Image (tube, helix red, strand yellow):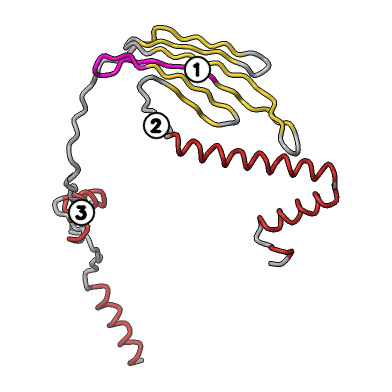
């Protein structure tokens, strides 16, 4: 009976104490108002680390300033090109600053040790005005023998002295005599000529007498 009285008193006391709701936001403010206030407070200060703020500073450009001077564009007065089905062609052009150029090209069959291959042969010329007012003209040929050019402005080597020319003639005569003798030996004794060729090939590779 005493226990029942105590429980009744506790329940009555609990009902008499005013109930209060706990909240993290100030009293009288709605959720939307709290969110706007928090956002405005965050915008007033920069909460990023100091290192990140330094990184965002603009980098000074130390590159030198280059000023380009524009010049008058040179027009193309004339341009023409003809292309044939066999690979040959012809082209020419002229510019407004007195440059003239023309070139022709065609395919030529070149025989090698193993097969015949096509080689492109190009021949042409071009001319222009030098700074001193002189007209420079260049003629050229490009084929399986390389690129060869000629012009009055190109320096030429001095002439070969008679003594040097005489020595060169003797060398060329010796090479020619050796070639004629080898051809005669190959005709009279093919087996010996073949052996000599094989031995010469070994010597050329550093395999003298058939040994490394």
Q: Is residue 34 left or right of residue 77?
A: left
Identity of the residue drawn at 16% across and 53% down? 41
Q: Check disc 2 and report its element: helix, strand or loop.
A: loop
Residue position for label 2: 157
- Mark 1 lies on a secondary structure that is strand
Q: Identify the disc placed on residue 124.
A: 1
Q: Rounded to the nearest whole Å, what is the CA distance between mark 2 and mark 1?
A: 24 Å
Query: Percent from the top left, x then y, of residue 84?
Result: 64, 13
Of residues 107 and 203, which is closer to you in this image? 203
Query: What is the C-alpha distance between the residues marked 3 and 1?
Result: 82 Å
Query: Which residue in the protein does label 3 denote?
Result: 38
Question: Horizontally, is 169 left or right of 162 in the view?
Answer: right
Q: Earlier in the sequence, mark 2 or mark 1?
A: 1
**Seen in the image, is 139 located left or right of residue 122?**
left
Return the disc, 3 or 1, that comes first in the chain's sequence: 3
State which region is magenta.
123-136
| Mark 2 and mark 3 residues within 8 Å of each other at the beta carbon | no
**Front: mark 2 or 3:** 2
- Residue 29 at what x, y percent from top left? 20, 53
| 124 drawn magenta | yes
Q: Nearer the viewer, mark 2 or mark 1?
A: 2
């Amino acid at each position: 009976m005493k226990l029942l009285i105590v429980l009744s008193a506790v329940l009555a006391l609990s009902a008499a104490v005013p109930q209060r709701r706990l909240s993290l936001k100030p009293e009288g403010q709605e959720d939307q108002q709290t969110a706007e206030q928090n956002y405005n407070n965050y915008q007033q200060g920069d909460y990023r680390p100091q290192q990140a703020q330094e990184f965002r500073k603009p980098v000074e450009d130390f590159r030198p300033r280059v000023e380009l001077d524009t010049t008058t564009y040179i027009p193309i007065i004339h341009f023409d090109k003809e292309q044939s089905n066999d690979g040959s062609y012809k082209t020419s052009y002229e510019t407004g600053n007195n440059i003239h150029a023309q070139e022709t090209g065609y395919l030529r069959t070149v025989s090698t040790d193993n097969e015949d291959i096509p080689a492109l042969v190009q021949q042409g010329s071009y001319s222009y005005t030098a700074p001193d007012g002189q007209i420079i003209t260049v003629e050229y040929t490009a084929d399986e023998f390389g690129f060869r050019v000629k012009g009055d402005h190109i320096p030429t080597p001095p002439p070969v002295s008679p003594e040097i020319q005489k020595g060169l003639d003797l060398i060329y005569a010796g090479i020619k005599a050796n070639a004629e003798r080898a051809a005669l030996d190959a005709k009279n004794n093919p087996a010996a000529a073949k052996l000599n060729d094989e031995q010469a090939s070994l010597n050329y590779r550093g395999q003298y007498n058939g040994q490394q």
